[in-house]
Image (cartoon, rainbow, N blue to C red):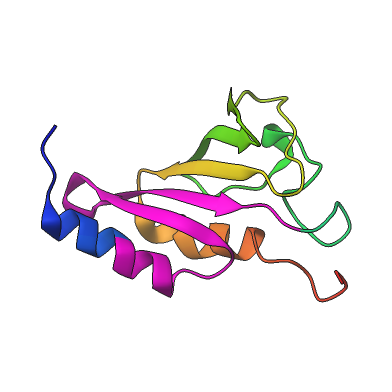
Amino acid sequence: MAISPQQATIGRLLKHVRRGDVVMVHSLRRGAAEAIEAVAHGDRGSSEVVGRAIDDINLPKGANICAIVRGDEAIIAHHGTRTEPEDHVILFFQDKSGVCEVERLFQVGVTFL
């Protein structure tokens, strides 16, 4: 396996500029695409992702939820897979233009305490 110090540095920097609870960011295809690990917080009333099936989450074009990590279990995401609080959601973006919209989806509403 080849490790690129440049790509590792870019991923760490992107993690800090992303909004929501973004755990990890990987820049792909020379920066044209990204893979993001985001944590789903809140409940169905305060979050646009928690308690919803993958098909019911309004993702921008080019964004896909690939997997969900729930505790020690890795789940391959299917259209009917539902997210739960504290799930780590792995997303792939073919086009980075939708990243800001997905970050907004993972932010918890002000009503969540």
Q: Position of residue 20 (x, y in %)?
A: 59, 66
Q: Position of residue 46 (x, y in %)?
A: 83, 62
Question: Is residue 101 placed above or below 52 in the rendered structure?
Answer: below
For the residue pair 102 and 60, the one nearer the viewer reads as 102
For the residue pair 98 and 68, the one nearer the viewer reads as 68
Q: Position of residue 38 (x, y in %)?
A: 55, 53
Task: Kindly indicate the quadrant of the structure image that contains residue 6.
Answer: bottom left
For the residue pair 52 and 38, the one nearer the viewer reads as 38
Task: Kindly indicate the quadrant of the structure image that contains residue 53.
Answer: top right
Question: Is residue 66 placed above or below 21 in the rendered structure?
Answer: above
Q: Is residue 46 magenta?
A: no
Q: At 35% across and 66% down in the image, what residue appears? A: 14
Q: At 66% across and 36% down in the image, what residue appears? A: 71
Marks counted in the figure total 0
Q: At 89% across and 58% down in the image, what residue appears? A: 45
For the residue pair 59 and 43, the one nearer the viewer reads as 43
Position of the C terminus by quadrant: bottom right
Q: Position of residue 33 (x, y in %)?
A: 30, 49
Task: Kindly indicate the quadrant of the structure image that contains residue 62.
Answer: top left
Position of the N terminus by quadrant: top left
Please give the range of residues in magenta. 12-41
